[in-house]
Amino acid sequence: MNDTRDVELNAIGVLKRREIEARILAPLVDALSRDFGGERVLQIVRETIVGIARDQGRQLVQISGDNSLRQFATVLPSWTTEDALEIEVLAQSEDELRFNVTRCRYAEMYEALGLSELGAILSCGRDAALIEGFNSDISLERPQTILGGASHCDFQYFVSPHPAEIRAPESLLHPPLPANSRF
């Protein structure tokens, strides 16, 4: 992927970008699911999105020249463009970044389109891989999401004291899907 093109695409706002992606991917996922089975198709989509997110994390480092948690926190405003997210920062230091997302227009958009399951893959499912690509010494814990039915998303990033021992939990790479799955 070309770093410059990705930055240019985000100029339209990440919320609008995710809506365009979902509107294009949903019919394709539906058609492929009929021929190849929904679970297999979603697994491929999930693995692809995780790979893209890791690459985007690496691109953030190249663009910013820094892979510290404090630098990562400077990216938050791009996610909130057009009030896409309402964030309440709980803690921010060199070793910790904790915040709650109290409103998520990404979740609202996916639900309005009837694409909660795909939205969980396209948006929620990329968070752990993004930070892993940005800096594998930073771990993410996020026990719940709005798209998964919670009142808020609770993001907890920590610089790992033992980087090689801590990796993103499998539940973050493959978040639970909403019960009303259509695939």
Image: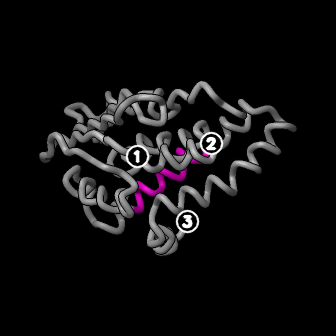
| Colour pattern | one colour
Tell me: 47 left or right of 12.
Answer: right
Q: Give the camera-side residue of 69 and 155.
A: 155
Asked where in the image residue 18 lies, by quadrant, the reply is bottom right
Magenta region: which residues?
46-59
Tag count in the figure? 3
Residue at which label 2 appears:
115
Mark 3 surroundings within 10 Å by alpha-carbon count, few (fewer than 14), some (14 through 19), many (20 or more): few
Residue at which label 1 appears:
104
Closer to the camera: disc 3 or disc 1?
Answer: 1
Residue at x-position 71% and y-position 30%: 39
Quarter of the image with the C terminus is top right
Q: Which of marks 1 and 3 precedes in the sequence? A: 3
Q: Main secondary structure of the magenta part?
A: helix
Q: Give the camera-side residue of 35 and 183.
A: 183
> Label 3, label 1: how many angstroms apart (C-alpha)?
27 Å
- Identify residue type, mark 1: Cys
Tag 1's secondary structure? strand
Tell me: 65 left or right of 41.
Answer: left
Q: Residue furthest right?
A: 35
Residue at x-position 29% and y-position 66%: 64
- Identify residue type, mark 3: Met
Residue 28 x %, y %: 76, 50
> Label 2, label 1: how many angstroms apart (C-alpha)?
15 Å
Residue 170 x %, y %: 47, 27
Tag 2's secondary structure? loop
Do tag 3 and tag 1 residues touch (Cβ < 8 Å)? no
- Identify residue type, mark 2: Leu
Q: Which of marks 2 and 3 precedes in the sequence? A: 3
> Label 3, label 2: how many angstroms apart (C-alpha)?
26 Å
Residue at which label 3 appears:
1
